[in-house]
Amino acid sequence: MKLPDVRYARTPEGAHVAYQVVGAGAVDLVWPGVGFSNLDLQWQMDSWARFPHQLGTITRLITFDPRGWGLSDRISEQQLPSLETRMADAVAVMDAAGSTRAALFGADATGPLAILFAATFPERTSALILYGTYASGRWSPDYPWAWTEDQWDTFLKETGERWGEPAYMEEYLRYLAPSAPTDPETVKAFTMFLRNAASPGTAVAINQLERETDVREVLQAVHVPTLVIHRTCDEVYEVGGGRYLAEHISGARLVELDGVNHLPWYGDPDAIVREIDRFLGSVLEEEAEFDRLLATLMFTDIVGSTQRASQLGDRAWRQLLATHHQRVRGLLGRYRGREIDTAGDGFLATFDGPARAVRCAVAIAQAMRDLRLEVRVGVHTGEIELEGDDLRGIAVHIGARVASLAAPGEVLVSSTVKDLVAGAGLSFEDAGEHELKGVPDRWHIYRVRE
């Protein structure tokens, strides 16, 4: 089999992301691999190589090594890519591969990335396929299929101490795929693959990011055709987690397959490929357009503007307000925000990633201090509806209410934003639970620490 060429996409930040294109099917299928990846070495193991080759017979498969491991640019273990960063990697890869719209295939640890992408970029997502993946990395009473804190602590400690050792890699392979062969050659190839995918420190950091990821609040914002595939006896991510995904994504179809293997290329990979082929065929026949998407909203407001205007007089206030607007718009450009509305002395802007929105909000608050202006800022991520240039939906009301709670010079975010920026290097402190006027339930709010 001729190996596909490795190519590099360049992100807006200048990072290089390695990708490959396999096959020439009617549907583009973007697959960021599983938890760890190395595009070169995956083709050196026959059982592994057969699976992407099969996908390439039914689709135009676009697969890549997310930034931080494999053949893509390595970065420090303290700054591994967040979900938002990896989503930007996927966009860059699609652009480089000439794909305007594709099905997303999230398997294992890349499931949350695919979910977030589908909700944020429905115009670029024809379908969502999830295999053996999860919605939350931590155990909770309403999500009992994830590991407890003690289980995570034990696993991360052992990973840091034993990653790359053949004996540990053999144990890890048996855990991921109980029916996989564990002869010396297979174990050697598996060990080499994982060592070249990630260093011990990177492996710990990647798993820590998985531990902190929670996309449950995003599931209701997915409105593309969705297929959830899960093996019934998967011990890595229990089938209950797959059922949860199917129950909470509108219209999702659940297919449960017999088997104990978590890695899709062991056991009966043909069954997985058949289900994907059947599903994508139905999507081609019944494709629909949606005007709903996930967006991060930022609201800003100048504190005490009426009093300041009366002190300065109309002309001086207009000049000060023009300077304020100029700085805000400059920062929106820097952080790739989109200005939606300017009501008086406040802004409403949207972002396609919550981390950029939070950093922009902090930068705006800081940029006003030498003007002796204080702003309150609120950030929320939720589902919106587009009506021309206008935004609709409860997420807009939530974002405005969060902003109204902020003290002068303060940036507040909803719990949804905090959960989605795990691994982005942002720091928060608890601002308590609040009732938001006109919005159901109580909402947990967090204060951004500069």
Image (cartoon, grey):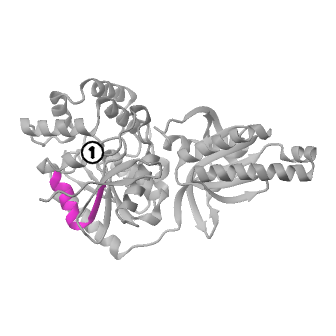
Density class for disc 1 (Cα within 10 Å; few <14, some 14-19, many ≥20) is: many
Dot 1 falls on a residue whose secondary structure is loop
**Which quarter of the figure is the N terminus placed in?**
bottom left
Q: Nearer the viewer, residue 380 or 25?
A: 25
Q: What residue is shown at x 28% (from left), y 28% (from top)?
A: 159
Point out residue 304 in the picture as x, y percentages from the top left corner: 83, 43
Q: Nearer the viewer, residue 345 or 11?
A: 11
In the rendered structure, the answer to whether residue 237 lies left or right of residue 180 reads right
* Rendered location of residue 445, percent (x, y): 62, 39
Asked whether 248 falls inside the magenta stretch, the response is no
Q: Is residue 62 magenta?
A: yes
Looking at the image, the residue that sits furthest to the bottom is: 285
The residue range painted magenta reads 49-63
Q: Can you say whether 37 is above or below 96 in the image? A: above
Q: Nearer the viewer, residue 78 or 438?
A: 78
Q: Which residue in the protein does label 1 denote?
A: 37
Percent of width and height locating residue 335? 57, 49
The amino acid pointed to by label 1 is Ser
Residue displayed at 37% across by 60% down:
96
Please identify the dominant SS of the magenta region.
helix
Q: Residue at x 21, y 56 (%)?
A: 52
Name the side, left or right, on which 358 lies relative to 33. right
In percent of width and height, residue 231 lies at 24, 50
Q: Residue 152, relative to residue 378: is it above or below?
A: above
Q: Is residue 304 above or below residue 152?
A: below
Does the image show residue 72? yes
The one of 185 and 439 positioned closer to us in this rendering: 185
